[in-house]
Image: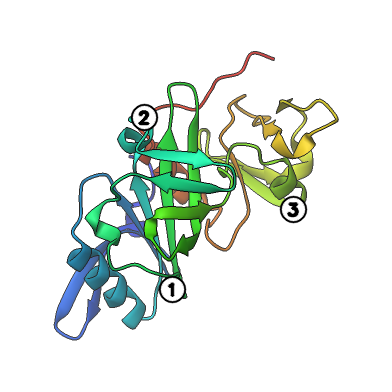
Amino acid sequence: MKYPEQNREITISSGDVRHRGDVVIGNTVIEFQHSPISSAHFQERTNFYLNAGYKVIWLFDFTSEYLENKIDFNGDHFVWIKPKSTFRDVTCAKENVDIFFQLSSDDVECIIRVNNISSKGFEVFKGSKPYSIGNWGELHRSMTCGCYHCGTVFLSNDICDWIGLDGRNADNATAICPFCGVNAVIPESPSYPLKKDFLEYLKTYCSKSPVQTEL
C-alpha cells in the first residue's frame, strides 16, 4: 500500500477507550469494511469517533450482495433483500456520518452514498448515483476532481472523453480520466477528500479495476 503511513491505522483515544481508524485525514475518520461487523460494534465505533470530535465515513464492500441480486436498483431507490444486521438500528441519517456502499459488477466498479433510509430501514433506501458512473452533472458542478485509479487530482475542465455522451442525455455520461484512461473519476465533495493518499487507499480497497476504455 502506498498511502502515507502517517494517515493510516491511527490510534484515537477518548477517555480510557482507544480505536484505530483505517485512515485519518484532518478531522475525518474513514473506515473500510470488507468483513461483517455487528450492529453493536458499528454503533459503538461510530459514536466513539463522533464523541472524539471526528466526522466518520464508512465504506462497505457489498459486491457479493449486488452480484447475487440481493441489492437491486428500482427506479429511484434501492431494494435490499435481508439487509445486513449491521444496520438494523440505523433508521435515519446521522450528522457527520456518511455511509457508502461499493456495488460492483463484472465490468463496472462503483460506489454509492446512502442518503435516505425508508421507514423499512435498509430494505428500501436511496443513494446517490455511483460517484464514478454517470457523473457528468456532478463533475460540471465541481471545479476539481480526482482519479482513484492513478491517484491524480485535476480540474474537471481537463476531462475530454466520456462514455455515453450523445448530446441528448448528458447526465448519464461517465468521465474518462485524461491521465490513465479509466472511468474512476470522482468529483470534489465534503465526503471525499481529494488527497492522493485517500485516492490510493480507495484504489487499494476496490477489489477489481475499473473499466479500461479504448479511445
> Of circles 2 and 3, which is in front?
2
Mark 2 Cα shell of 10 Å, populated few (<14), some (14-19), many (≥20): some
- Amino acid type shown at disc 2: Leu
Q: Determine contact: label 3, label 1, CB under 8 Å.
A: no
Whether residue 52 appears in this view of the structure is no
Question: Mark 3 highlights which residue?
Answer: 143
x, y percentage for residue 96? 46, 73
Q: Nearer the viewer, residue 161 or 110?
A: 110
Give percent across and percent down for residue 97. Answer: 43, 68
Quadrant location, the C terminus: top right
**Real-space CA distance between mark 2 and mark 3, rounded to the nearest whole angstrom:** 34 Å
Residue 63 marker? none
Looking at the rendered structure, the kind of residue marked 3 is Met
Q: Which residue is mark 2?
A: 67
Specify whether 159 is left or right of 203: right
Q: Residue at x 38, y 56 (%)?
A: 122
Specify the farthest residue to the top: 214
Residue 13 position (above or below residue 66): below
Which part of the image, by quadrant, shows the N terminus? top left
- Whether 209 is drawn above or below 65: the answer is above
Q: Is 163 situated above or below 27?
A: above
Which one is earlier in the sequence, the residue at label 2 or at label 1?
2
> Label 1 amino acid?
Lys
Q: Nearer the viewer, mark 2 or mark 1?
A: 2
Q: How far is the residue under mark 3 from the one under mark 1? A: 28 Å
To which residue does mark 1 refer? 94
SS class, disc 2: helix
Q: Position of residue 168 (x, y in %)?
A: 84, 31
In the image as oriented, which residue stretches furthest toward the front?
A: 120
In this view, the residue in front, 2 or 60, is 60
Category of crowding for the residue at label 1, using alpha-carbon neighbours closer than 10 angstroms: few (below 14), some (14–19), many (at least 20):
few
